[in-house]
Image (cartoon, coloured by chain):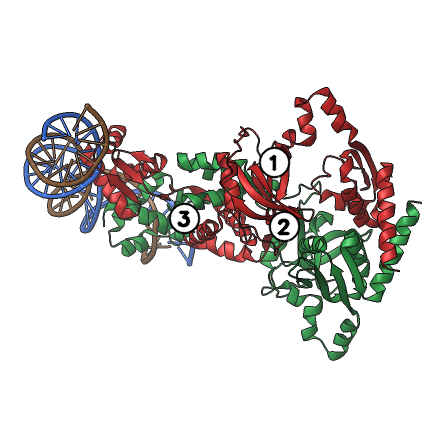
Chain colours: A red, B green, C brown, D blue
Amino acid sequence: MSKSKRLLDLMMTVNRKRKFNVRELADEFGVSTRTILRDLQELGELGVPLYSEVGPHGGYQVLNERILPPIAFTEEEAVAIFFASHALRHYEYLPFKEASVTALRKFYHYMPGDVRDRIDEMKHRIDFVTPARQAEFPYLSVLLEAAIDQKVLLIGYESRGERRLRPVQPVGIYASNGLWYCPAYCFLRGGIRVFRCDRIDAVEEEASGYEPLDLRRVHLGNRHEYTAEGQLRGQSDGAKAQISRNKVRLYAELTAEGVQACEAELWSASLLHIRADGTGWLEGEAPAQDMRFFARFFTGLGNEAMVHEPPELVEELKTMLEEMLRKYS
Amino acid sequence: MSKSKRLLDLMMTVNRKRKFNVRELADEFGVSTRTILRDLQELGELGVPLYSEVGPHGGYQVLNERILPPIAFTEEEAVAIFFASHALRHYEYLPFKEASVTALRKFYHYMPGDVRDRIDEMKHRIDFVTPARQAEFPYLSVLLEAAIDQKVLLIGYESRGERRLRPVQPVGIYASNGLWYCPAYCFLRGGIRVFRCDRIDAVEEEASGYEPLDLRRVHLGNRHEYTAEGQLRGQSDGAKAQISRNKVRLYAELTAEGVQACEAELWSASLLHIRADGTGWLEGEAPAQDMRFFARFFTGLGNEAMVHEPPELVEELKTMLEEMLRKYS
DNA sequence: GTGATAGTGACAACTATTGTCACAAATAAA
DNA sequence: TTTATTTGTGACAATAGTTGTCACTATCAC
């Protein structure tokens, strides 16, 4: 094997292993340790940030800056990666904000000239818009770390006008429509709740007295199975009945425009049915305590929706409309 | 310069130039053409997809697959790029959909082991949600190409219940809240309009009779200057007055919750004012013909908003509320 | 045909690479 | 303290690789 090829291979190898020693590599590449030492020195000169320690348990390490191996990307692929990263600039708060900025700059910088030209051409012609919020999200990193490390945090949270300290164990964080949310197991409520991250005004990593639960299997993708109705499975029949009693059947007709508006709402995805002509309806179970929310939602749809069930919701709607009318008279 | 280093440099050089010939490189690197020929052959064996043609105007080319040079990324940067690209999976329609999938796979594949571990740990703990729509956007690539190449397209577009063929010259495309939009110069209306891409049901690249305008300076970032009020600048005083006459002053008080809801709306950003206690107000100019839209919007805010001006809007609101109330009685 | 271009082969001169060995220095653990 | 382990350096000779030159081929556009 030629030296050039060995150096390239070596570059990838040392990036794969976090730690290694000279003998190990020598065996792997079938050359003497002296050669490997010389190669490593050369890699260092080429920019790979190597660090070594002598003595037993010593050895080589690649520092935080890692050289990615040369990856063969098609032009299209490079463009796709660029625009994906470019889209992150809309997020003012991001757990790895600085990293994403520098990464994008590096990526662009090392791009061959004509790919860069193509990117420049497209830069102002395609975008992924995210609403820019005035809200502040200073605790995203802490929440994310806690979710990964299965730790309990004490958060200051404002909800319905009152502020409380809550011990929670985050499941993860997600951004939707410019806002960050954090589903977490709430020790106060004994279940998984979603917290809006801009309403968290303090985070304390010291939450003594609360043992972390084993929520490793719960994540953003499956958390619904562990929340509200999902928890039915594990509960006694009595509890099930209790929860079921709080469910009501929802049914509302939608015009074509109403359908389009509903498609924008995440919660409605499972309830939405669409006819060939574009109109449709919402149908399914909904928690009884959410009627105020639904009333507000359907009011917003104006004449594009007609609620038929449940009667409580129709009542709530009427009350709401009357109240508003009174305000304007 | 050692051969290894020259090969690495050569790799980057041939990726930067799309076309080149042997003599050129020989001069650049200060070696003989024979050496360059041997080097190029070796690069080929290392995986760089080279293609050559003999004869005058012949030379070397790098084919579509380009080897990106080794880029030094920190772990954080690699993670950021990964998640940015990962977020694209929410978009079922994308001008470079396949590319983004294969790019992500390659990127992940070549990642050193421990970075990959970290990514796996985070994969289900952080996400950028985009509403999944049932709408279809088959023409994104054509629209984008047309925007870049300054071409006129004939599109079939449905608006307010009627379908029409329109000659348009796209300015670009953008995704917002799961839907794709295309601002374009509409030759029918003689101005820039925004089209929802799922309502475009046909695209014809042959639009004879319409000469492309020079819209190279108009792009997603500055298109507002060329649309509606922006166009005032270039118009006669008479026309200005005409347009101004259609503007009305908007003023509405908002509760704290109302403020939060408004922050989600892109159009309201410039009108929104927030007080220290979280409440706020919307104030500013708005097109008179949009009153129906505003009525709908403020109905959706329920009691979180109180509209004071313009009187037309208050009237529209009352009518709307009464109509809805009647429907439920 | 002419000139530009890639491509090959051979060879000698030159250069780089490699393994070996000897030894230094650091350090953790016995 | 001693020992084992590890990186690190220097020297040197044998070997292997690299380079430039030159001669020659093939293709192709003009």
Residue toward you, B254 or A5: B254
Residue A186, numbered circle = 1
Q: CA distance from mark 2 to mark 1?
A: 49 Å
**Disc 2: which chain?**
B
- In-image side of A276 versus A97 (left or right): right
Q: Nearer the viewer, mark 3 or mark 1?
A: 1
Q: Secondary structure at mark 1?
A: strand
**Disc 3: which chain?**
B
Q: Residue at x 50, y 49 (%)?
A: A82
Name the amino acid type tagged 1: Cys
Which residue extends farthest top? A237
Q: Secondary structure at mark 2?
A: helix
Circle 2/circle 1 CB separation < 8 Å: no
Residue B143 can be seen in this image? no
Determine whether B163 is above or below B222 in the image.
above
Residue B61, numbered circle = 3
x, y percent for residue B1:
23, 50
